[in-house]
């Protein structure tokens, strides 16, 4: 098959996240199976307009938002010999059915954004995004197959009546690799590893660190993003000496930090799934996550981690102390977390996705 992926970022974009990891892991496996994959995304600073990575052909043009418009011209002027087009919606899709005819188009939705727009963007942009996603998108994709990550996202897609066709679910996988084992930190460590954006719930994590700053617990913040300076300012103003910043780290450093942590926290407002939750579980680290779409799918409450009401930093603090003070419970959940993570193999997920777009 010849597959075209339309995504607003690529795997080399400094702001890349779970969506880009998801398709990169699938695409490189499709390449190994003998298929061809072209990935179009907007340009980023110092990016190449065209390059191949693991056999995937990357084409980058224009900017963060204008790239959506350029995708039309890029498709119309270039080769159109594709068997399947995967239109990835990260809030806004590429509206490919308007200019791509007589091809199999699949809309991929990680999660419905809706109110996330108003948490992340200024009002005019938020309103535009909200209207495009909730009003225009269902009109354009009403007869297209949608693929998503979790049962929560599946339920939202059904509720919003985006397509007349029932969505398909393909959970993300994780990389099963050999790694150097590292012991848990001597002192309890609570880890936040994600993009530093407001809707990711970083404020809840900070409030929790403040609530427990007299305890012998370290709070580690790993990642980069447009909200990082706000976070650092808050930490300084509240004298959070129990808070440590690592910035963006390499894959090897991530593996080490996830092993050293006693608890991984995902306090996000909403996720499509939460690959980082499964990754933390793979290294035997329990996850305490907000009880919201996506996270409640990837965290089994009481078994692979714990769930708390979104934004309730006092409850999050209680659950952190509960696990830290109960070594037996912590060990039991760690064991179950590892078993849960072992179910998510990228090879199987790549095959599942390919079966959908090839039929």
Image (cartoon, rainbow, N blue to C red):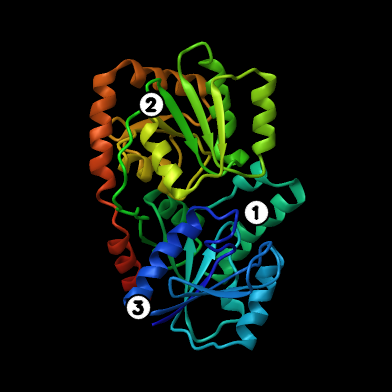
Name the mark nearer the viewer: 3 or 2. 2
Q: Is residue 276 above or below residue 148?
A: above
Q: Are marks 2 and 1 in contact (CB under 8 Å)?
A: no
| The quadrant where residue 45 appears | bottom right
Q: Which residue is mark 1?
A: 130
Along the viewing direction, whichever of 352 and 166 lies nearer the viewer: 352
Residue shown at the point (44%, 52%) measured from the top left: 153
To which quarter of the image does residue 236 belong? top right
Percent x, y for residue 302?
Answer: 29, 30
Q: Secondary structure at mark 3?
A: helix
| Residue 42 marker | none
In the picture as drawn, the residue positioned furthest to the top comes out as: 214
> Which residue corresponds to mark 3?
358
Left or right: 256 in relation to 95: left
Say which of 326 and 162 sits in front: 326
Which of the pair 323/214 is nearer the observer? 214
Of badges 1 and 3, nearer the viewer stands: 3
User: Which quadrant does the N terminus fall into?
Assistant: bottom left
* Residue appearing at x 64%, y 48% in the figure: 117
Helix, strand or loop under label 1 = helix
- The mark that comes first in sequence, 2 or 1, is 1
- Residue pointed to by mark 2: 185
Q: State how far apart marks 2 and 1 are (Cα).
A: 43 Å
Mark 1 or 3, nearer chain start: 1
Q: Position of residue 222 (x, y in %)?
A: 53, 38
Give residue 221's position: percent from left, percent from top.
Answer: 54, 33
């Amino acid at each position: 098959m010849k597959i075209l992926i339309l995504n607003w970022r690529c795997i080399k974009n400094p702001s890349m996240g779970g969506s880009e990891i998801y398709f990169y892991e699938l695409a490189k496996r499709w390449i190994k199976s003998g298929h061809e994959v072209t990935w179009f995304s907007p340009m980023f600073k110092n990016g190449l307009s065209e390059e191949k990575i693991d056999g995937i052909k990357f084409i980058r043009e224009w900017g963060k938002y204008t790239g959506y418009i350029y995708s039309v011209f890029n498709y119309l002027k270039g080769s159109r010999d594709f068997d399947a087009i995967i239109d990835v919606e990260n809030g806004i899709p590429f509206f490919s059915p308007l200019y791509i005819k007589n091809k199999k188009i699949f809309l991929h939705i990680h999660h419905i954004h809706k109110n996330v727009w108003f948490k992340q963007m200024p009002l005019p942009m938020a309103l535009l995004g909200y209207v495009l996603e909730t009003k225009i998108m269902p009109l354009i994709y009403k007869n297209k197959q949608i693929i998503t990550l979790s049962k929560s996202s599946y339920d939202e897609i059904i509720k919003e009546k985006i397509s007349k066709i029932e969505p398909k679910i393909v959970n993300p996988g994780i990389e099963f690799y050999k790694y150097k084992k590292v012991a848990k930190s001597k002192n309890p460590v609570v880890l936040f590893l994600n993009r530093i954006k407001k809707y990711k719930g970083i404020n809840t994590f900070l409030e929790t660190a403040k609530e427990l700053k007299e305890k012998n617990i370290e709070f580690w913040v790993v990642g980069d993003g447009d909200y990082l300076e706000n976070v650092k300012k808050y930490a300084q103003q509240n004298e959070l000496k129990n808070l440590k910043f690592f910035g963006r780290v390499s894959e090897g450093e991530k593996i080490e930090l996830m092993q050293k942590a006693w608890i991984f926290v995902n306090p996000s407002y909403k996720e499509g799934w939460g690959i980082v939750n499964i990754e933390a579980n793979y290294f035997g680290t329990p996850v305490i996550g907000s009880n919201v779409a996506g996270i409640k799918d990837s965290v089994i409450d009481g078994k692979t981690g714990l769930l708390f009401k979104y934004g309730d930093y006092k409850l999050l603090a209680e659950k952190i102390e509960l696990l830290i003070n109960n070594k037996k419970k912590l060990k039991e959940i760690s064991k179950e977390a590892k078993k849960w993570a072992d179910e998510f193999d990228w090879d199987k997920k790549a095959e599942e996705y390919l079966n959908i777009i090839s039929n």
